[in-house]
């Protein structure tokens, strides 16, 4: 990563992301975790981080190591603190296994509240053939030194976006009109992406990458929180070392809801993940 070139990069399995997504197996199918406040946006835990937590629990539950597709419904906003993940194996096969998982927390009255529920199919990315036939092309993002990150803007309100301290984001200036009070109206967001400690990407961190950029709603002139209702991620390839490029577009905002379609490309110009989410836009 650019500013931290002299600092040894964290390794996969030994970074803040790995520690903060680690789950402790209490018994088969039940895991405990303390959701870190480091991955919050205005006190709500980021949806991509939550997806990585459940993805890690499912990787422990299922016989295959890698998420191929994972669909999440966000039922209530998660808060930093203790949580329980319950998993269930739905089906196992030779090349794919399917499982479901839910994350629970407790409300002030001590009642259990389900925060997020996912259904996922897992396989082994290293066993896939190398054949690629595609019309997709990597997003045209300027070089990193011509892009801008949170550190280049005004100081955020304390505690409003702790997650940005854990990410390396360098946004395409063409998608930064919202930060200057002149949104483009195009519903696009593009950025270089990595973890701040230099840890390379893996299939679990791709689940974070698709939901870590500022909302495309900002470029549509809509400010404020854009909570995710549903998010589906397809992991297509194990990413090569180096920074990722993430491109997100919205084509339709109607009835107070919008979709975000994301593509994630690695340093070898491979499309390594795709996603679509439905989010609620807080219209004035």
Image: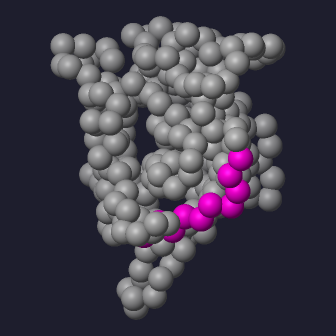
Give the image location of residue 9, x and y in percent: 26, 22
Determine the residue positioned at 40% across, 91% down: 109
Task: Kindly indicate the quadrant of the structure image that contains residue 242.
Answer: top left
Q: Nearer the viewer, residue 144 or 120?
A: 120
- The answer to whether residue 107 is seen in the rendering is yes
**Position above or below: 93 against 139:** below
Determine the residue positioned at 27% across, 51% down: 158
Outermost residue toward the front in this view: 94
Outermost residue toward the bottom in this view: 109
Quadrant the C terminus occupies: bottom right
Is-magenta flag for residue 196? no
Quadrant the N terminus occupies: top left
Give the image location of residue 126, x and y in percent: 58, 25
The range drawn in magenta is: 84-93
Q: Nearer the viewer, residue 138 or 200?
A: 200
Determine the residue positioned at 63% across, 38% down: 123
Give the image location of residue 67, x and y in percent: 59, 41
Compared across the picture, whether 252 is left or right of 74 comes to right
- The answer to whether residue 220 is seen in the rendering is no
Compared across the picture, whether 204 is left or right of 197 comes to right
By secondary structure, the bulk of the magenta-drawn segment is best described as strand
Give the image location of residue 136, x and y in percent: 75, 17
Is-magenta flag for residue 85? yes
Number of marks in the image? 0
Q: Nearer the viewer, residue 259 or 105?
A: 105
Determine the residue positioned at 55% across, 10% down: 268
Compared across the picture, whether 135 is left or right of 157 comes to right
Give the colour scheme shown.
Answer: one colour
């Amino acid at each position: 990563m650019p500013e931290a070139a002299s600092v040894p990069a964290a390794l996969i399995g030994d970074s803040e992301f790995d520690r903060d997504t680690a789950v402790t197996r209490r018994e088969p199918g039940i895991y405990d975790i303390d959701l870190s406040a480091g991955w919050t946006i205005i006190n709500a835990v980021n949806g991509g981080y939550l997806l990585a937590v459940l993805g890690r629990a499912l990787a422990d539950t299922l016989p295959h190591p890698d998420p191929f597709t994972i669909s999440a419904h966000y039922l209530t906003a998660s808060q930093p603190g203790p949580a329980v993940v319950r998993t269930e194996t739905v089906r196992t096969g030779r090349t794919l296994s399917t499982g479901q998982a839910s994350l629970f927390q407790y409300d002030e009255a001590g009642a259990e509240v389900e925060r997020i529920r996912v259904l996922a199919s897992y396989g082994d990315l290293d066993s896939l053939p190398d054949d690629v036939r595609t019309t997709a092309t990597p997003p045209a993002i300027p070089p990193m030194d011509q892009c801008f990150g949170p550190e280049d803007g005004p100081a955020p309100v304390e505690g409003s976006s702790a997650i940005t301290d854990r990410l390396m984001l360098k946004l395409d200036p063409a998608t930064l009109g919202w930060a200057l009070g002149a949104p483009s109206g195009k519903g696009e967001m593009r950025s270089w992406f990595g973890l701040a400690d230099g840890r390379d990407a893996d299939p679990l961190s791709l689940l974070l990458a698709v939901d870590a950029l500022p909302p495309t709603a900002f470029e549509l002139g809509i400010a404020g929180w854009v909570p995710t209702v549903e998010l589906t991620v397809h992991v297509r390839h194990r990413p090569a070392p180096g920074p990722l490029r993430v491109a997100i577009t919205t084509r339709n905002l109607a009835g107070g809801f919008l979709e975000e379609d994301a593509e994630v490309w690695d340093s070898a110009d491979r499309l390594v993940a795709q996603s679509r989410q439905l989010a609620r836009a807080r219209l004035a």
